[in-house]
Amino acid sequence: MMAASLSSKVVLAQQQTGGQVAPATPPQTGLAPTPAPPAPGPVPWMSGLDNLKPPALGEITADMVAVTETRFFTGLQMATLRHLCDLLVPPWGKYPGALEAGAPEFLDFLIGASPLDRQQLFQGGLDRLDRESNEHFHKAFAALAPAEADTLIRPWLRTWMTDHPPTEPYARFINLAHADIRTATINSQAWAQAADAQSRGEALYWFPVDPDLRRKLTSAPGLAPNA
């Protein structure tokens, strides 16, 4: 009887409210809602970031893009280095020379990132090369003819083992510069492209640099030239 009475009361209440049960309201606690936590304050490593503004974009002409920007050597030292590169590693057959391979620009970057003693060796060597050119020929080294430059360079060339260059500072510079110029040239993109164009499939990843070495190898029985 009690269960039937309760059921009838529930049905009567649903009829009075249109068949819908009103949602229960949350109890009133009298407490204000908890505010969101404030944003963290500035940290030391973010100091000044709010004041940074991106630089304005300006127009760049084609001539500005084409100009080579030296990073380490002075303009005179770079001119001396470029002429030295052209003399020591000129174009050979269909292979590029040091200038075409971008060796001077690479060495400008390489020496600029080298230890101080190597930087001073190259700076002092290039300065002396230009100074001796002015003393003997009354003009900059960059303006010398090949025969004139040969009289300044050849007396200092030495035969030396890898990692054991000459100890005398100027001879050390001439021979290390020669080795670095050649290494930068044959490891350049221009040289790799020329080598790929000349390759016939044999002697993969090996391409002679020294003409004397090439003559000895190709003259041996059973060996044919690869270019």
Image: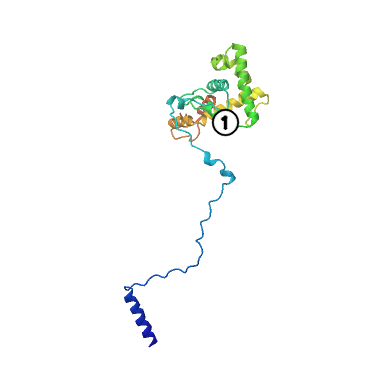
Q: Residue at x 43, y 31 (%)?
A: 197
Q: Residue at x 60, y 13 (%)?
A: 134
Most extreme residue toward the front is 30
Q: Is residue 150 visible?
A: yes
Q: Residue 44 in the image: x percent, y percent?
A: 59, 44
Give neighbour class at mark 1: few <14, some 14-19, many 20+ (Cα, 10 Å): some
Is 158 left, or right, of 105 in this rendering? right
Q: Is residue 180 above or below residue 34?
A: above
Q: Residue 151 in the image: x percent, y percent?
A: 60, 15
Give residue 201's quadrant in the image: top left
Amino acid, disc 1: Leu
Say which element carries label 1. helix
Q: Is residue 226 visible?
A: no
Q: Residue 73 in the image: x percent, y percent?
A: 58, 25
* Residue to which mark 1 is pinned: 110
Give residue 173's quadrant in the image: top right
Q: Residue at x 62, y 16 (%)?
A: 131
Q: Of 217 and 175, which appears nearest the observer?
A: 175
Is 223 left, or right, of 4 in this rendering? right
Q: Of 103 and 124, which appears nearest the observer?
A: 124
Q: Residue 27 in the image: x percent, y percent?
A: 47, 69
Q: Of 206 and 11, which appears nearest the observer?
A: 11
Give residue 9's quadrant in the image: bottom left
Most extreme residue toward the bottom is 1
* Number of on-image labels: 1
Is 185 left, or right, of 157 in this rendering? left
Q: Of 10 and 96, which appears nearest the observer?
A: 10
Q: Residue at x 62, y 12 (%)?
A: 135
Most extreme residue toward the right is 168
Q: Quadrant of the N terminus?
A: bottom left
